[in-house]
Image (tube, rainbow, N blue to C red):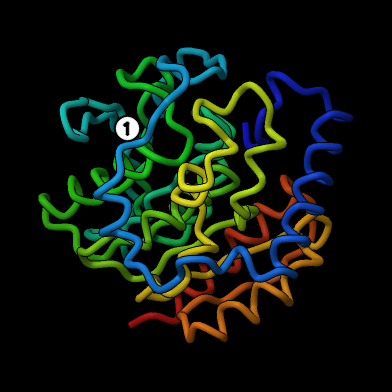
Amino acid sequence: MSIGFQWTMGGRRYLIACLLALVLAAVFVAKGLILTQQAQNYAQERQAYKTQLRRAGPSPQRYEKLALPANATAITYPSGDLQLKAWLVNPKGRAEPLATVIYLHGGFAFDLGDYEAALPFVDAGYAVMYPFLRGENGNPGNFELMYGEVDDALAAARWLIARGTTRIAFFGHSIGGGTAELAALRHDGPLLLSGSAGALYPPEVFRSWGEGVPFDATDRKEARLRTFLPHLSSLKRRHVAYVGSEEPQAPLVPEYREMAARHDTPLSIVIVPGDHQASLAPAVQAFLAELGKLP
């Protein structure tokens, strides 16, 4: 699953929520408020702040027990005091993969559709690690919505590095894309490239997502620390953000590019065809092309 809070919304309500988020984002971009506190170091600010959850518990998205695909290995990786599940898929016919892509899925539970979405990386010669994040798919921990989950993504990278993998990339879709963006701001180990699809959320977006949000969405700091755009000045290594041509945030891309240029940040924003879901496949192919340019 890849689209926001669909367990509490029908398609009509989700569309309305997206449009509301678009209006809010446009207003805040126009006023320049999304640029507040850009000068701060995101990693330091994030480390110093403990999120305040209104509700502790697992992900609100239902999941099914999944059969392990024949080409996958089930692993466990530590994130703080949590032991979390993941799948690792290596490409066939190669002594070593070109690199390992940490694929961060959309929605709040991993399913076979997420596994299939990243198989083009495997077909192209890359290994893929699919981390299951805290509070989802039976994992321990609380659902935090792009907060503790970012710690899990970074822990997945550390697990790979501890085993000698130094060619690493992050890529995620939707909520997973937001997680990939925030991980890129904090990761201090080897990183080839990071990318996201359908994930350039402004802090105001959480106000339109209803009861599924586990923190106070009106708390500016809580929302800001969960979003990438207010922290562009902290981005030190290249990130490619893909936006579907039919997504609600597509009209804001010129403003977002201007923000990136203003802060001289290594962010590329690329429009790919499709809506929130249909744009994922072309985004994966475009990101593969970017990886292929690297030495």
Q: Position of residue 56 (x, y in %)?
A: 40, 16
Percent coordinates x, y for residue 283 in the rendering = 63, 61
The residue that appears at 44% across and 50% down in the rendered structure is 225
Name the quadrant of the C terminus.
bottom left
Is there any visible trace of residue 103 in the rendered image?
yes
Left or right: where 263 falls relative to 254: left
Q: Nearer the viewer, residue 89 or 159?
A: 159
Describe residue 57's horizontal placement relative to residue 252 as left or right: left
> Where does the N terminus fall, quadrant-wise?
top right
Disc 1 designates what residue? 86
Name the residue at 57% across, 48% down. Answer: 173
User: Is label 1 in a helix, a strand or a loop?
Assistant: strand
The answer to whether residue 291 shows anywhere in this view is no
Foreground pick, 109 / 224: 224
In this orientation, which residue lies closer to the viewer: 107 or 8? 8
Q: Is residue 124 above or below residue 276?
A: below
| Residue 124 left/right relative to 75 | right
Question: Taking 209 as reference, is 38 above or below it?
Answer: below
Q: Residues within 10 Å of mark 1 (few under 14, many from 20)?
A: some
In the rendered image, residue 122, in percent from the top left (x then y), is placed at 43, 52
